[in-house]
Amino acid sequence: MRSSLESPGFRPPAARGLGNERRSVAFAELAATLALALSTMVVATVLSVGIARASVADGVVGHELSLFAIALLLGLLFVGIGGYSVLPGDKAKK
């Protein structure tokens, strides 16, 4: 038995390369990527419609505008920090 997983996911075991399975592995990766993209778009649409129908922003902005502005700025700050952390940096190669 192997003690650790060296290449999880759609990759073959480390001791064996891909032969005829290369096309089916590529298709499985493509199908998984398309399904994830489609489900993300569906969720974003459903949430947008739900928020628009609930008119949540009217109730929040009408009563506590300053709290809403602070929450919005913090959210944008967190999104910016997350985006900045994804950018490629000057990393030393091993």
Image (cartoon, rainbow, N blue to C red):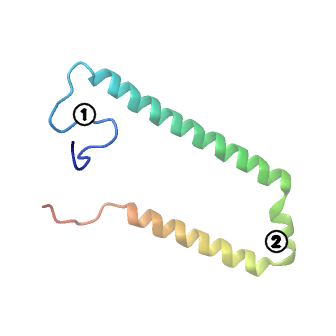
Give the structural element (helix, strand or loop) at label 1.
loop
Decide if residue 18 is on the left or right side of residue 77. left
Identify whether 3 is placed above or below 77.
above
Q: Which residue lies furthest to the bottom in this view?
A: 66
Amino acid type, callout 1: Pro
Point 41% across, 66% down: residue = 84
Pick the quarter of the image with the C terminus.
bottom left
Pick the quarter of the image with the N terminus.
top left
For marks 1 and 2, the one nearer the N-term is: 1
Decide if residue 35 is on the left or right side of residue 44. left
Q: Residues within 10 Å of mark 2 (few under 14, many from 20)?
A: few
Where's residue 39, x and y in %? 59, 39
Identify whether 49 is placed above or below 80.
above
Where's residue 88, x and y in %? 31, 60
Point 45% across, 63% down: residue = 83
Whether the residues at callouts 1 and 2 have beta carbons within 8 Å, the answer is no
Which residue occupies the foreground of this view, 26 or 2? 2
Q: Mark 1 points at which residue?
A: 12
Amino acid type, callout 2: Val
Q: Name the residue under label 2.
A: 61
Identify whether 67 is placed above or below 2.
below
